Every structure is written in structure tokens, then in C-alpha cells.
Image (spheres, helix red, strand yellow):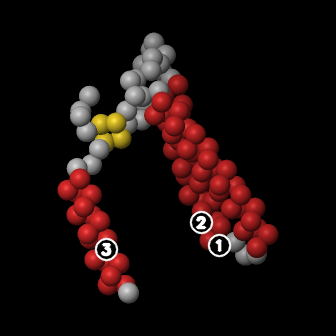
Amino acid sequence: MNSQEVMNPKSEILPDEKRFNDRDRLNDLLISIKHITYMYSLACQEASNNELYTKLFSLFQESSQLQRKNYDLMFEKGWYKLEKEQAQKIDTKHQTFKSEESQLS
């Protein structure tokens, strides 16, 4: 494992890697939920009245929570990894953002 990667040890999945396994199912579900959450976000922005907005926003929050739970499960099983970013790159991005933010003032 690369020292820049943050992940748990990989869990065992179904023996035949060529078949649609648990990892594939969760990955497919994560992609689907991300798309649904994005679409609810757009629908909220375009809601024609407050009652519709409230219902759509509730669905948006629910799908966001499902997305997070799915991500957490994949990370716990070692099927989703993150990479640590170098502090210098973070500082550079932060300075760029601050510069752009000050131009908007």
C-alpha cells in the first residue's frame, strides 16, 4: 500500500472475481445514489413552490445519507480508498482560493 493511501484492509469477496460480486454491487449502488442525489439537488433548485421544495429537499437529504452509509461500508471493507494530499498542495489551493475570494469582495 502506498504511504499516501488511506484505506482499510480489503475484505474477502466472492471467490470468482469475474462475476458481479458484493464490491461491484456496492460500487454500482454508490454511483446510482450519487446520480440520484445530484438530480434531487437540481430538482430542489427548480421547485415551483415551497411544498414541492420541502418534499424534494427531504428526499435529497435521505439520498445523501444513503450515499454516505454506502461509502462508509465500502471504506470499512477496504473497497474504497483515499489518497493523502501533500500539505504544500493544500496550502497552494488554499492561497488560490483566498486570492479569488478577495477579488470578489
Q: Amino acid at mark 2?
A: Leu
Residue drawn at x 27%, y 58% is 90
Measure the alpha-carbon separation of dots 3 and 2: 28 Å
On screen, residue 79 versus residue 45, left or right, reads left
Judging by the rendered image, the residue that carries numbered circle 3 is 98
Q: Is residue 29 visible?
A: no
Q: Where 63 sits versus 95, above or below?
A: above
> So how many labels did they put on this image?
3
As rendered, which of 18 and 89 lies closer to the eye? 89
Q: Quadrant of residue 39?
A: bottom right
Q: Position of residue 87 (x, y in %)?
A: 23, 53
Residue drawn at x 51%, y 37% is 72
Q: Given contact means CB atoms under 8 Å apart, are the residues at marks 1 and 2 in contact?
A: yes
Pointer 1 local density, CA inside 10 Å: few below 14, some 14–19, many at least 20: few
Judging by the rendered image, the residue that carries numbered circle 1 is 46
Measure the alpha-carbon separation of dots 3 and 1: 31 Å
- Residue that protrudes farthest toward the left in the picture: 88
Pointer 2 local density, CA inside 10 Å: few below 14, some 14–19, many at least 20: few
Q: Earlier in the sequence, mark 3 or mark 1?
A: 1
Q: Where 70 sits versus 103, above or below?
A: above
Judging by the rendered image, the residue that carries numbered circle 2 is 42
Looking at the rendered structure, the secondary structure element under dot 3 is helix
Pointer 3 local density, CA inside 10 Å: few below 14, some 14–19, many at least 20: few
Q: Amino acid at mark 1?
A: Glu
Q: Amino acid at mark 3?
A: Lys
